[in-house]
Image: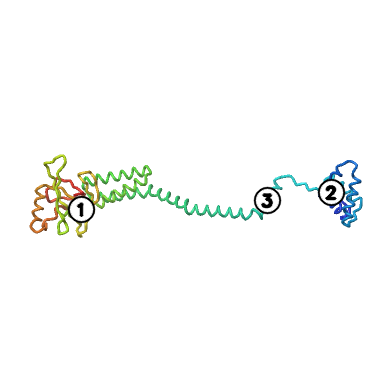
Amino acid sequence: MPAADTRPLDDVLLAMDVVDTLRHREQALARELDAVGRETALLDRLREIYKAQGIEVPDHVLQEGVRALEEQRFQYKPPKRTLSVRLAEVYVSRARWWKPVVGLLTAIAIGLGVYQLGVAGPAQARAAAIEAELSTGLPDELQTIHRAIMNISDEDVALRRADTFLQDGLQAVEARNVEGGRAAVENLKELRTDITTSYDVRVVYGPDEPRSGVFRIPNDAPNTRNYYLIVEAVDPAGRLVEVPITNEENGETRRVTRWGQRVSASAFDTIASDKRDDQIIQNAVIGQKIVGRLSPDFSVETPGGAILEW
């Protein structure tokens, strides 16, 4: 360990001041210090500088200052850029960077929270709901509606259609096609509604009805006429019921309350005659659809077929 410096504090301070003077005064002082054999002249100049300031500096202090400058004794030497030095610098400058860093971290935390609540959370919930729907929801609902149809109807057409929709739904579930499964459920529900609904097929008439029937001449059979009665489906409470009807002219199927039902020429003439005398059709109901069946049974002769526009 180096020996302790026992020089008077005033001498040390004066020596430091001499070094500072040498370092910051005119460049001529530095040049004189660099020149060999010019130390005496340099000391004289230093005496003049301090005398002009009213300060008496002993020669040994001036000489000590010159040697100190040569030895770079009072020159600051920055420490090496070690990890500890860098960490210390970061800590010392914390007042400058702490608030922005805290603000950034806070913003990130808020952003993550918003993302979790607004995006990730709902997405995870939807994924879990879809998984539950595919594993139990859709299969159970498909089987339940299918069993209900089996219990209501014994009509081959209805049962075959129910089996087809059930298989469509189960295959969609197995393929993890949730939309396909939902579509099959809706088809089964619609089929269940159709077979559980009862209604009369009634020919329209009255002052607000311009016609109760029309005929068509097919393009490929100009000598033939197809006869249609304009009818509507009416439930036991007198409400109109939407039923699936396929247009035989273009194959389009729509759910409607009114359509043109094709009948024989004799059935058409009978209804026309019934209406002609008083504009009232006494026997307006020409068919009835009962629970458990998909199609109505007609009381008049009809070759089947229907139109949706006239």
Q: Name the spot of residue 257 as percent of width and height, x first.
A: 22, 53
Residue assigned mark 2:
22
Check disc 3 and report its element: helix, strand or loop: helix
Amino acid carrying mark 1 in the image:
Arg
Q: Residues within 10 Å of mark 1 (few under 14, many from 20)?
A: many
Residue assigned mark 3:
90
> Is 203 left, or right, of 141 in this rendering?
left
Q: Which mark is residue 232?
A: none
Residue under the point 87% across and 49% down? 65
Nearer to us of marks 3 and 2 is 2
**Do tag 2 and tag 1 residues touch (Cβ < 8 Å)?**
no
Q: Which mark is residue 258?
A: 1
Amino acid carrying mark 2 in the image:
Leu
Pointer 1 or 3: first along the chain: 3
Amino acid carrying mark 3 in the image:
Val
Q: Residues within 10 Å of mark 2 (few under 14, many from 20)?
A: many
Residue sitting nearer the eye, 93 or 241: 93
- Measure the alpha-carbon separation of dots 3 and 2: 35 Å
Which quadrant of the figure has residue 206? bottom left
> Is 17 left, or right, of 141 in this rendering?
right
Pointer 3 or 2: first along the chain: 2
Check disc 2 and report its element: helix, strand or loop: helix
Q: Name the spot of residue 18 as percent of width and height, x first.
A: 85, 51
- Measure the alpha-carbon separation of dots 2 and 1: 114 Å
Q: Residues within 10 Å of mark 3 (few under 14, many from 20)?
A: some
Residue sitting nearer the eye, 204 or 159: 204
Colour mode? rainbow
Residue sitting nearer the eye, 13 or 196: 13
